[in-house]
Amino acid sequence: MASSTSTSSSTHTTYISKTTHLPSSKHLFASNSNSISFRTKPNSQNKIVSALQTPSVIQIPKQAPMKSPRIDTLASNSLSSGQNWNVLQRVASMVLDAIENGIVSQQNTRPLPKTVDPDVQIAGNFAPVPEQPVRSLLPVVGTVPDYIQGVYLRNGANPLFEPTSGHHLFDGDGMIYAVKFDEGSVSYACRFTETHRLVQERAFGKPVFPKAIGELHGHSGIAKLMLFYARGLCGLLDHTNGIGVANAGLVYFNNRLLAMSEDDLPYHVRVTCSGDLKTAGRYDFDGQLKSSMIAHPKIDPVSGELFALSYDVIQKPYLKYFRFSPDGKKSNDVAIELEKPTMVHDFAITENFVVVPDHQVVFKMSEMVTGGSPVVYDKEKVSRFGVLDKYAEDGLGIKWIDVPECFCFHLWNAWEEPDHDELVVIGSCMSPADSIFNECNEELKSVLSEIRLNLKTGVSTRRQIISPENDVNLEAGMVNKHLLGRKTQFAYLAIAEPWPKVSGFAKVDLSTGETKKFFYGDEKYGGEPLFLPRNPSSEAEDDGHILAFVHDEKTWRSELQIVNAMTMELEATVKLPSRVPYGFHGTFIDAEDLATQA
């Protein structure tokens, strides 16, 4: 049964990480007409200290794509289908395939780091599932609150094909999982976001686009890049319309649901009346957006504007900031000068400012030449935050404030305290900073922190919000969206333990550190908790419910749990017709907005 607990207090004490060692595992491979799978042999002698070690079954389902006129047109026009190749192109394809097979064979003679080993990265309920057409009239235990009308959506990485070499969890093709609530009736569907990448790889019958994290390591990564562009030069595939997977973030803006990953433009996805999902296409805001956009744009709850960043790993400016008016009109790009290309996965807004992190995880493409990963931890660099006016026309006025040894993969909120000349930033500080991307023997810790930036003195302070004796890894979550950029009392964050699984969520009082925890149940794990406010004008900030996909690893069944955010009690459970893998970020679109989709 689900349960909740409560702890309190905060501290400035530094948390000391423990070390852990992951045992290797052996696999048996099996195949049939429906799937390609491999099974992990459990080793009872090895203590499981990371969820990625859990003995499991991985299945890469063979599946027919959802049919729609747009997808049929893309597939028939795809260069990669081979239907329109001339003799030279066919020869080139065979030669390049042979070269690729040689590279993969060479790679497979060496053990992969756990951070890019598919046997580790997509094990258990991280493994992909096939598309699920709409299933209606789902059973519900308890009562769904009357105000929950619309659709809850969550994004995730779901590789279409079994990886042939390195694969990181973040590399999978985007799939959206949707639960629709309609006057007492509940339905479920999940669909791939039909990116240009996915459509072409489906036509090829195998993965041919390089995986940004899993494959771009060392000399083999350089070779994979060369093969990719060689196929493009030979007219075998089209790399001019983006290489993104659209698997990370979801935002509903200007009557459009946008699926995003930071390596491409967003993709516009429509929710049908029945609750199904259809990809409308790659979305450039009517020709205004010329670059990629990170997966965590921010919507100001007062102005209705959307604020975003774009980073480049090759050429300056390495970082750009821009915004969109509520009706989708884009501002000019504001170049933010960085010395090195830096991973900027998230940022924050306040009433008047944007807060931009410039941390120590950087891109160093030259590392590939020497056999390493291009994503590295720069120990010589000092982490800092930049504060820029939201309506600045250029980046010259940005004020940088050092925050040493700080890496926040996600920022939950920020607000202004003018009486103290300070900006308060709430984020989860992760250490080691690059352990998500590079193999490390230290256990990853994610510490909920309050970072104060003094705009007058240029000095920062950092406070651990929850006391060390009560601390848990908190990653993925949100505050009340109607208070984004303003002072909030509560944050709702995933309890990422055992890392990277999520055993429940915590409701944290950001001032006192008081923490109320809700656990999904025995051997039940979930993902990001979504806080759905009952009403924008509610007097109580926590008047609403938490929605979270949950998977039972005993029964291998999934469900959607709905928890009262004020009482922290489970009120309803929607039984889902198929497994929902652990994933990334989500959103909720209410019924009124669904009716006005573009």
Image (cartoon, helix red, strand yellow):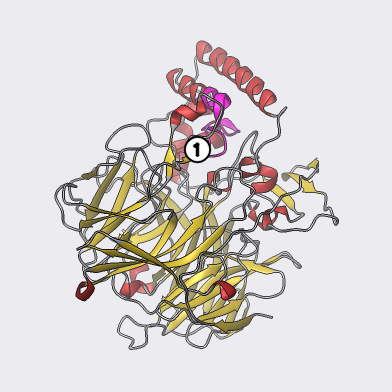
Indicate the quadrant where residue 457 lies.
bottom left
Percent across and percent down for residue 44 are: 85, 57
Disc 1 marks a residue whose amino acid type is: Ala
Quarter of the N terminus within the rendering: bottom right
Percent across and percent down for residue 567 are: 51, 88
Whether residue 476 appears in this view of the structure is no
Residue at x-position 40% and y-position 52% = 295
Residue at x-position 28% and y-position 60% = 459
Q: Is residue 589 magenta?
A: no
- Whether residue 208 is situated above or below residue 305 in the rendered picture: above
Q: Quick check: 595 left or right of 191?
A: left
The magenta span reads 204-224
Residue at x-position 62% and y-position 36% = 166
Percent across and percent down for residue 556 are: 73, 64
Residue at x-position 16% and y-position 51% = 397
Q: 266 or 568, which is in the foreground?
A: 568
Quarter of the C terminus within the rendering: bottom left
Q: Is residue 216 magenta?
A: yes
Badge 1 element? loop
Percent across and percent down for residue 222 are: 51, 24
| Majority SS type along the magenta span | loop
- Whether residue 25 is situated above or below residue 93 in the rendered picture: below
Pointer 1 residue: 212
Label 1, residues with CA under 10 Å away: few <14, some 14-19, many ≥20: some
Indicate the quadrant where residue 489 lies.
bottom left
